Structures are given as C-alpha cells and as structure tokens.
C-alpha cells in the first residue's frame, strides 16, 4: 500500500488512521513492526518529517536506513530509478521527499515496496495533512463545521494544498487569506468544491476574528522580484500578539514549521499556540501510517 497523495485514501481510511494514532498517543495501542526496515530517502532538507518518520519507525521496532543523496552514487550519474530499485532491495518501505512534483508517484511505479510521500515539490504532503487533521481533532474535538483560516503563501505551500482537500472531506468551513498573487490555484479549489462542496471564503487581508483554528505558513520572500515589497508583505501578514485581542479565546494556532518570523515569538508561550504539539503528534501519526501501509 502506497500513500502518495491525500487523494489516495478516503475518509474511512483517514478516520481509521487518526483513531489508531489517538490510541497510540494515549498508550492504549502499540505497533509491532519488528524485523521490518524503513529507508528514509530525502532529496531536500527536512527536520520534522525525516526525524519523526525515523522516530516512529524505531518506536514500532523497525530499523532505519538513512539514504544521503550527497554521498550516494547519484553523484556518479546513477539515475533516480536505478537508485530506487537498489534501495528497494534493502528495505520494506520507503519514505521519500523530493523537490520535483510527481517524483514520489513515479517512485511508486518503479518499485513494488510501499512508498510514503514526505513531500514532493509544491504538490502534496499527505502525512503532514494527517498530522494537521489529527491536531485539529485533538485540540478542538472535531473538524466538521469549524471555522478554519489558512494564512500565508497559499500558491506554493504543498502543506496547504493537501490540507484544503482534507478539510473539505471532513466538512470544515475554510477561509483562505494570502497576499495578492499568492492565492491558491482556483482550479484546485474548484476540484475540491466539486468533490466535497467545500465552503470557502477568499481574502487578501489578514482577519481571523471568527476563526476556531488559524493555520499559518510563511510568506516565501524568494518569490518576490522586489525585496522591499516582500518585506512589506511579510510584515503585513506577520501574526503579532496584539493582533489576537479580537480573536476567540479558545483559538488554536497551528503551523507546519519551520517558522521564521511569521509568528511573533511571544505567541509561543500563549495557550493558543499548538504548533510544537502539532510537530510532536507526527510520531504517533506516522506510526499509524507505517502500520497502515505495511499491513
């Protein structure tokens, strides 16, 4: 079983994974994959995704092979496909991150062992979406009918693309807030609306007074031709402690991390800030995912 995109699994499967992760997190269930081996193949930098996959695997009793592109035969000119076929012989499952969109799906057609997408370019990041849904459910008790605001660069953030699909699947009310020119692809939103009837509002001005959950991602300054414009936009979309005075008292603030300066550091100590807990939920969630793909 592969997990390449959040589109690959239905709501019943997702609920099963989330419920399993909840039991693991509460100590009511364990995952025994003793004797299995996970290969982590990350072709671009990662902290949380890579380490939480490795930690999850170890907690399931698995061994971990950490593939390093910089010291591999790729440097000698070996193809991506040949590298995959080689690593397949050493592991029972592969967790792959790659900068090119579609590379992980390609990998799943080249080899027969289960493949999990750890992020492919600006396309999909399904396990992060499952962590996000798990975090929302864990902190708010449900997903359906919650007002969830996604704020930041929504054009290039793969995390947000996957999450919108998941939120549509579970009946959330979604508000998308981004700088002009960095809106989420309208065709993608139409696809999600056609499939789930997603209730979406779109705005270019930061406002989260009605939000139950505020999910923030960074403004990617490198996308701007003018660095002064980039700085101005980043400042406008930066979440400051004073901005939360009109927010709901039980607002939950999430972020896929790493955060740079899009959230004022003083907010880290506020009870609304749940992004570090969100990162830690990656371990039980990815334990449940490894169990799902291997069983």
Image (spheres, rainbow, N blue to C red):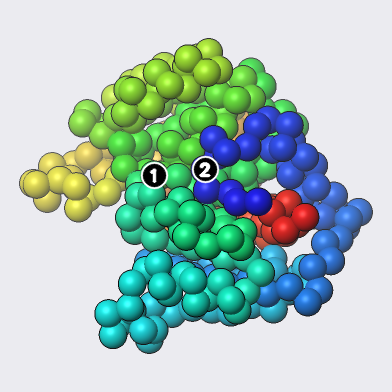
Residue at image coords 26%, 34% = 182
Q: Position of residue 26 (x, y in %)?
A: 85, 53
- Residues packed near mark 2 inside 10 Å, few (<14), some (14 to 19) or many (20 plus): many
| Front position in the image: 57 or 94 | 94
Q: Is residue 7 visible?
A: yes
| Residue 278 in sight here | no
Reply above or below: 216 against 209. below
Residue 179 in the figure: left or right of residue 227: right
State how far apart marks 2 and 1 are (Cα). Answer: 9 Å
**In the image as oriented, which residue stretches furthest toward the right?**
28
Residue 25 left/right relative to 192: right
Q: Quadrant of the C terminus?
A: bottom right
Figure quadrant of residue 250: top right
Up-down: is 22 above or below 167?
A: below
The label shown at residue 274 is none
Q: Residue at x 33, y 78 (%)?
A: 78
Q: Residue at x 44, y 38 (%)?
A: 160
Around disc 1, counting alpha carbons within 10 Å, would you say few (fewer than 14), some (14 to 19), or many (20 or more)? some
How many numbered discs, if any? Answer: 2
Q: Position of residue 285 (x, y in %)?
A: 69, 53
Q: Secondary structure at mark 2?
A: loop
Please provide percent x and percent y for residue 81: 40, 67
Q: Say whether marks 2 and 1 touch (CB < 8 Å).
A: yes
Give me the residue at 85% from left, 49% from top: 23
For label 2, the residue is 5
Q: Is residue 210 left or right of residue 2?
A: left
Q: Taking 38 as reference, is 30 above or below it?
A: above
Q: Estimate the x, y position of residue 265 in percent, counting from the top left.
A: 45, 55
Check disc 1 and report the residue beneath it.
123
The foreground one among 19 and 173 is: 19
First in residue order: circle 2 vs circle 1 = 2
């Amino acid at each position: 079983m592969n997990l390449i995109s959040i589109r690959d699994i239905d709501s019943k499967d997702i609920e099963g994974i989330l419920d399993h992760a909840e039991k693991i997190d509460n100590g009511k269930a364990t995952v025994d994959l003793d004797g299995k081996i996970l290969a982590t193949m990350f072709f671009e930098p990662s902290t949380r995704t890579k380490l939480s996959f490795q930690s999850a695997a170890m907690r399931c009793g698995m061994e971990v092979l950490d593939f390093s592109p910089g010291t591999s035969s790729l440097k000698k000119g070996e193809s991506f496909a040949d590298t995959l076929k080689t690593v397949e012989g050493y592991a029972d499952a592969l967790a792959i991150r790659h900068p090119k969109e579609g590379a992980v799906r390609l990998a799943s057609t080249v080899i027969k062992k289960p493949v999990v997408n750890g992020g492919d370019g600006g396309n999909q990041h399904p396990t992060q979406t499952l962590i996000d849904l798990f975090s929302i459910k864990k902190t708010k008790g449900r997903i359906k009918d919650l007002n969830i605001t996604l704020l930041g660069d929504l054009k290039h953030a793969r995390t947000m693309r996957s999450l919108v699909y998941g939120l549509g699947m579970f009946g959330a009310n979604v508000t998308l807030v981004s700088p002009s020119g960095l809106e989420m692809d309208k065709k993608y939103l139409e696809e999600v609306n056609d499939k789930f009837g997603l209730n979406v509002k779109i705005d270019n001005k930061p406002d989260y007074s009605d939000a139950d959950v505020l999910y923030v991602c960074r403004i990617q300054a490198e996308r701007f031709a003018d660095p002064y414009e980039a700085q101005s936009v980043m400042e406008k979309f930066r979440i400051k402690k004073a901005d939360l005075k009109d927010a709901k008292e039980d607002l939950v603030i999430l972020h896929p991390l790493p955060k740079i300066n899009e959230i004022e550091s003083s907010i880290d100590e506020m009870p609304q800030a749940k992004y570090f807990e969100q990162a830690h939920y990656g371990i039980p969630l990815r334990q449940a995912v490894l169990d799902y793909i291997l069983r």
